[in-house]
Image (spheres, rainbow, N blue to C red):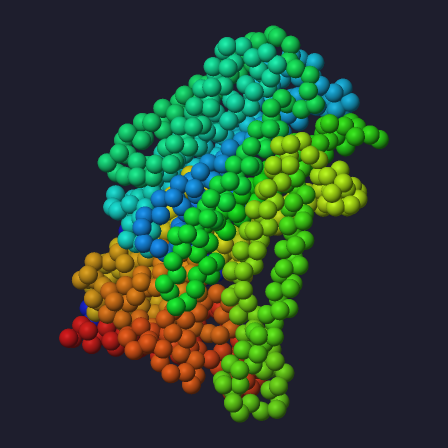
Amino acid sequence: MSDTSPPSGKQDPPDDVIELRVHGVSGAAAEQVLDRPHAHQVAGDRSGGFYRPRPGYPDSTGPGGVVLEAYRWSDLPSGTATRTLSLVFLLPFMLSNVAIWMRPARRGPGSGVKVLCRLLGLNLTVLYVLSAAGVALDLIAWKCMDSSRCLMGRAWLSWLGGRPVGLRLAVLALLPIAAVVLVWLLGARPGRSYDAFRMQVGGPEGDRLSAVGQWDAMPMVGRLRAIHIAAAFAMLDLTLLAAHGATDPSVVTLALAGLAVLVLIACAALLCAPDLLERAGTARTVDRLATWLRAVACALTVTALGVVVLDRSRWPASDGLPGYGRIVGWAFLSQMVLLAVLAVLALWRSADRERRPALLHGLGAPVIAAFAVGLSGAFSAELVYRTAYFLNRRAITGRANDLADPPLAYKWALFTFFLTTIVAVLIVAALTLLSRRARRRAAAEIVARDFPDAPPQAAERIRRIEKMIARARFTEWLGPLALAYACLTALGLVTGLLGLFGLQPSPLAERLLGVPGGFVNFGLTIGSYLIAGVVVALVVGGLFAYRTAEFRRYVGVVWDLGTFWPRAAHPFAPPCYAERAVPELAKRICYLAERHRGVLLTGHSHGSVLLAATVLQLPPQVQARVALLTYGSPLDRLYARLFPAYLGRDVLHEVGERLDWRWLNLWRETDPIGGWIFAAHRPGDPPAHADPSGQVDRRLRDPEDLLAPPSDSVPPPVQGHWPCESDERFAAAVRELADRLRAQHHG
């Protein structure tokens, strides 16, 4: 739907100020955002549209007579069940892509951080292929089809049993090939709702936050996708050829294996040249190189399958697919090395010149990368381990069998996930208890200053308010928790070394620590069920986030934060919805600024982040007619401290300066997500800044009162992170900014 005037046929008075509201992650309906019972769409489409109160109904204008309009974007990141579930299964890829945007704020291009994040992303793709190969080639083709007891009662497998090993491997290799094709198609699926907003401006560095929505990431995503597909097929080829040439490799096998290694090296080398990969002037050359690598890898796969099928020589006798366990071990080891180097580089580059420290102390990139690596390893280990259990539980009874044992690297991953989960739960409990007194004390002081003359009958309500404020302040402790979990994950990766040396978890723990072997086996089983529980929880969460707006408020923060950033590290991460939302908002604001006295932008929660990015892209003549009202905003509390290089305080000051400080931010102490941006301005505090930024933040007392007013039977609710469009204090801020826009217009 194109831009239109209201269907009534009447143009808005040219001297009216229009208020454009942008919701947060809750996915509210247009009627709820507008705080009006009837709304109709005036621009956009079903994924992202602009709405106004339906004409002909009373009270269709906003505070101070402003024209109301809302932008509903909630269907862009997770508007369909398929897209939402893809976010769940692509979560490790999404986290690895977010990590590249979390580099420290120190000046410079940060090329080292970008290179390491992209190499880690490539490693996740390789591990994805290896897990699929472990199920198809190692467990089924090599182990199960060589065991009559495993094939017993399984007609869907027995038809291939007894066939030559090469034929079995070639046929079952179609499963990992299909897995590669699946992510290839997911990564290359057309973003039809985004196509009209592709821009050829800037680069991945951009003007910091303005890189979002201004830089067209699709060309580089195509290059990254070709590189990852080439590496995936090359790793599958190397796995097949390593098994084929384990005893007496032929010249052809060695040559093909060497070519597969060269393809892997070439893929890594391209990722190590960010200037070559990102620069528009070299785009055509890199596109040809990446496409050529992908074509070579695909041709190599066909050739390797042919060699495996046609070679009638005797395959080596082995408990597992020859070479596979060692390849997996080296993949885990390379993760550990890359994470360690990334952490050292992030520490060296971090130079915190801000008065408010970064939430992760400048280690955001390695911490989130550790989460991505940990999830990827856990998912891969669970897939292989669960398949081994499924194949073994009916065929093997009473004694151990190789079929029940996945490669040691996966076994250690399961056990360390079990230990990491236990320690993480203990750390959460300890930090909760240790911080409780300080949080409750601070909350009591806030409530005492807000309600100095509280009546005795309000004592119970005061205690509940103090608990909510103390709970909201726990957000400040999420940084240490994330750092602790990342360190545990990194330590877990060290166990990959033990797997490379053939050390089993159970006897090693019994010999060195005196831990009974039964406890280790118990840990393996519980770790497997924990990972399965995480997968189920993610699936259920994704479905409920799609179907239930209330539940989306809690899980939407992860999805919307992760998909806000363009795909600059991993091509299989979910698409960036801001590539449409930001330029669409900018276009609409320019249209409205030509027809109105001014445009007041009001953004709740993540909507304030979209508006901040949009303001940086507006032409100067439009910025002069725009004001900004944010509420429940995570701009400073989360984004500025998680992404200091792209949304630091200097960028926030730039937003204010471009608007000539026509900016107000409303915040509550009970809000666990939003907060103040420049200054807290609690009651009785002196002004924090003499410059205009000190006048931006305005604290809303929450709740408004302790007792029920004479006109009501219940006291005012505690709002927390809920929007405040119906709050009179919100209306007062709208009127103030609208008056400033009118005065600016007259001036």
Q: Residue at 35% across / 80% down in the picture?
A: 687
**238 horizontally vs 463: left or right:** left
| Residue 169 at x, y percent in the picture | 60, 19
| Residue 336 at x, y percent in the picture | 54, 41
**505 horizontally vs 356: left or right:** right
| Residue 501 at x, y percent in the picture | 64, 32
Q: Residue at 62% across / 86% down in the picture?
A: 459
| Residue 236 at x, y percent in the picture | 52, 25
Q: Is residue 634 visible?
A: no
Kindly indicate the quadrant of the structure image that contains residue 61: bottom left
When the figure is inspected, residue 79 is found, relative to residue 409, above or below; the finding is: below
**653 horizontally vs 560: left or right:** left
Q: Residue at 52% across / 14% down in the picture?
A: 253
Picture quarter with the C terminus: bottom left
Q: Nearer the viewer, residue 439 or 60?
A: 439
Q: Nearer the viewer, residue 235 or 611?
A: 235
When the figure is inspected, residue 67 is found, relative to residue 332, above or below; the finding is: below
Q: Is residue 14 visible?
A: yes
**655 horizontally vs 455: left or right:** left
Q: Nearer the viewer, residue 178 or 65?
A: 178
